[in-house]
């Protein structure tokens, strides 16, 4: 968008439009919690959903998140040290201006703290095609060509949900799918909706030597896919530990993006 100001935060300079900045600040300080649960239909236009909101096509079905051969599922790093992730926002959105602002805020939360820079597409072959599909979902990591990322409006129009889907597109699975999750949460299998148990599968993940993060934007809420209102995920040892926030990426989420993309090295 148009550059209206230069701002400084934590000694870093960045450009922004005033609207985006104001929205950014107001959401930061007045956001409440949104927990992302099942997105309804398990199949949309031939894509299968394996973890609620992660789409997989045949070529990536066996890929487990942030471990792929030769890091081919990561967005490439530019010679200037930044990782540019081109995107387009579908013209099909109604209230396009508001939609654009919300999406930009979700991008800013990652953009400001990491070397991953979301940029409007000019001519790139691989890019995110952000569109109002059915529910909120994304592919894992970079696929080839235009890569659909669905943010239904208004259901997914929350900056934390945008950041969540963007993190899938960067290659992150849900926090409770981590290989070491059983030491940190109990999955209450009998409370999970019929046909939804696959959403609680564990993956062989690269945990980047980071501790398990209950506050991750990638963590499910405690009632995700609940059959009859009972919890499906209980943290341990303290069952009251909050999980499932969608305010914005946690400190550890940011750290993980910086580690995975080797920002600053
Ligand atoms: Zn997700």
Image (cartoon, rainbow, N blue to C red):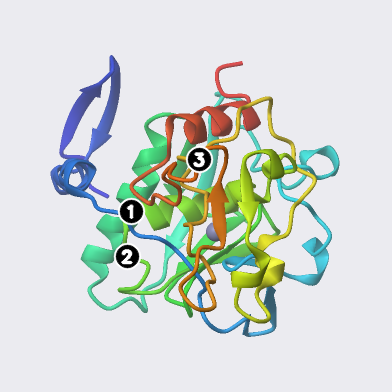
Is label 1 in a helix, a strand or a loop? helix
State the image coordinates of residue 97 (x, y, percent, origin top left): 22, 65
Rendered image quadrant of residue 48:
bottom right
Ligand 1 image-quadrant field = bottom right
- C-alpha span from label 3 to label 1: 19 Å
Is 181 situated above or below 142?
above
| Residue at the spot 63% in from the left edge and 24% down from the top edge | 262
Tell me if residue 28 comes above or below residue 168 in the rendering: above
Q: Secondary structure at mark 2?
A: loop
In front of the other: 99 or 77: 99
- Element on which disc 3 rests: loop
In terms of depth relative to the viewer, which is nearer, 198 or 236? 236
| Residue 255 picture location, percent across and down | 52, 27
For label 3, the residue is: 214
What is the x, y in percent for residue 142?
Answer: 66, 52
Select label 2 or label 3 by which is in front: 3
Q: Which of pointers 3 and 1 indicates the residue nearer the eye?
A: 3
**Which label's residue is closer to the chain start, 2 or 3?**
2
Residue at the (44%, 41%) spot, across then down? 241
Dot 2 corresponds to which residue?
Answer: 157
The residue labelled by disc 1 is: 159
């Amino acid at each position: 968008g148009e550059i209206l100001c230069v701002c400084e935060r934590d000694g870093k300079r960045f450009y922004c439009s005033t609207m985006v900045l104001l929205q950014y600040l107001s959401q930061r300080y007045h956001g409440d919690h949104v927990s992302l649960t099942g997105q309804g239909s398990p199949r949309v236009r031939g894509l299968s959903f394996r973890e609620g909101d992660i789409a997989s096509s045949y070529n990536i079905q066996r890929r487990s998140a942030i471990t792929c051969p030769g890091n081919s599922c990561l967005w490439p790093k530019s010679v200037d040290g930044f990782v540019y992730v081109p995107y387009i926002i579908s013209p099909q959105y109604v209230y396009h201006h508001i939609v654009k602002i919300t999406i930009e805020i979700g991008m800013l939360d990652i953009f400001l703290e990491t070397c991953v820079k979301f940029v409007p597409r000019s001519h790139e072959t691989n890019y995110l095609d952000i569109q109002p599909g059915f529910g909120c979902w994304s592919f894992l990591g970079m696929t080839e060509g235009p890569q659909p990322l669905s943010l239904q409006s208004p259901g997914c129009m929350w900056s934390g949900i945008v950041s969540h889907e963007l993190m899938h597109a960067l290659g992150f699975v849900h926090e409770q799918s981590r290989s070491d999750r059983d030491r940190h949460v109990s999955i209450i299998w009998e409370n999970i909706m019929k046909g939804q148990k696959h959403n609680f599968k564990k993956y062989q993940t690269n945990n980047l030597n980071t501790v398990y993060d209950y506050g991750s934007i990638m963590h499910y809420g405690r009632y995700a896919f609940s059959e009859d209102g009972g919890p499906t995920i209980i943290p341990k040892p303290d069952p009251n530990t909050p999980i499932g926030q969608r305010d914005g990426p946690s400190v550890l989420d940011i750290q993980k993006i910086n580690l995975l993309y080797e920002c600053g090295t």
